[in-house]
Amino acid sequence: MACPFPEPGLARRRQIWRQPLALALMGIALCGCSFDLGSMMPEKDKPQEAPKAVAAAPDSAVSAANVTEAQTHTAKAQALAKSGETQAALDEFNRAVALDPYNAQALYGRGLLYQGNNEHDFAIADFGAASGLNPQKAEPLLGRAVSYLAIGKVKEAAADLDEASEADPHNAQVWTTRGQAYERLGDKTKAAASYSRAVALRPRDDAARSGLARVGG
């Protein structure tokens, strides 16, 4: 993908945006599976096929018993992730998704773990499935955008962040990451507007403040 920055300043500019992007990745990883998706309950639409599922999803409707068991595995996975036992957490999320492929919490949590392991293709698939189940939620869109940025799909990231900013206009992290995306695309106007919104919502957001200074906001 062609870089929007001029070649002479390429190395310097890459170094500039890598730090805030790393902060965004770390911020999402730290909130990790402790984030309560609460209302992210299954809807009728079937999600995308989840990667690395333990077993194929059944053709028939998911039973109530499977839903309950999947929720138990999800809760266990969240606890394991918070304690730093990421592989064990991933195993539990896999079990949850195998039992109930419409479990948005498990998909989102597993996506965060994949993202933390730099397995961004898997993360993107899980975030996409979680977003498909609950399109009104900004968090899966933000997660997918961060992975898109990590693999250089900046336009796709910007599109997700546009949607996330509409879903949750009070989410400072969405605006900071949106600023990073548009800065990389060379759109200083949108980048400055995004960074400004982030600073207004979270005045001590150093990544947003630095970004705003870079784009002349």
Image (cartoon, rainbow, N blue to C red):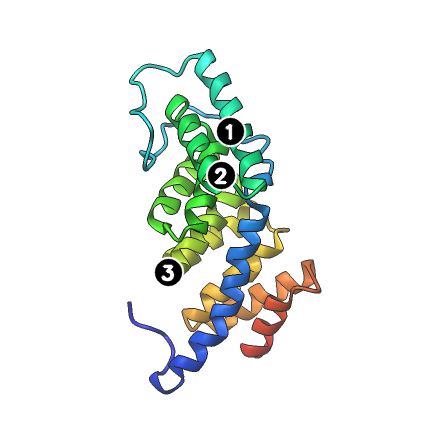
Quadrant (top left, top right, bottom left, bottom right) of the C terminus: bottom right
Mark 1 = which residue? 74
Amino acid type shown at disc 3: Lys
Q: Nearer the viewer, residue 98 or 193?
A: 98
The first of marks 1 and 3 along the sequence is 1
SS at mark 1 in the image:
helix
Side of 50 where 107 appears, left or right: right
Residue displayed at 55% across by 28% down: 75
Q: Residues within 10 Å of mark 1 (few under 14, many from 20)?
A: many
Q: x and y percent of residue 115 in the render?
A: 43, 49
Mark 2 = which residue? 109
Check whether the beta carbons of the residues at disc 2 and disc 1 lie within 8 A of each other: yes
Q: x and y percent of residue 214 in the render?
A: 55, 78
Q: Nearer the viewer, residue 200 or 62?
A: 62
Side of 33 where 186 appears, left or right: left
* Count of numbered circles on the image: 3
Residue displayed at 47% across by 25% down: 42
| Whether residue 116 can be seen here | yes
Residue displayed at 52% across by 23% down: 71
The first of marks 2 and 3 along the sequence is 2
Give the Cα separation between the discs numbered 1 and 3: 32 Å
Residue displayed at 46% across by 28% down: 103
Mark 3 = which residue? 155
Q: x and y percent of residue 209 in the render?
A: 63, 71
Compared to 10, does 153 lie above or below?
Answer: above
Check whether the beta carbons of the residues at disc 1 and disc 3 lie within 8 A of each other: no
Amino acid type shown at disc 2: Gly
Q: Nearer the viewer, mark 1 or mark 3?
A: 1
- In the image, farthest residue toward the bottom: 8
Check whether the beta carbons of the residues at disc 2 and disc 3 lie within 8 A of each other: no
Picture disc at residue 181:
none
Q: Nearer the viewer, mark 2 or mark 3?
A: 2
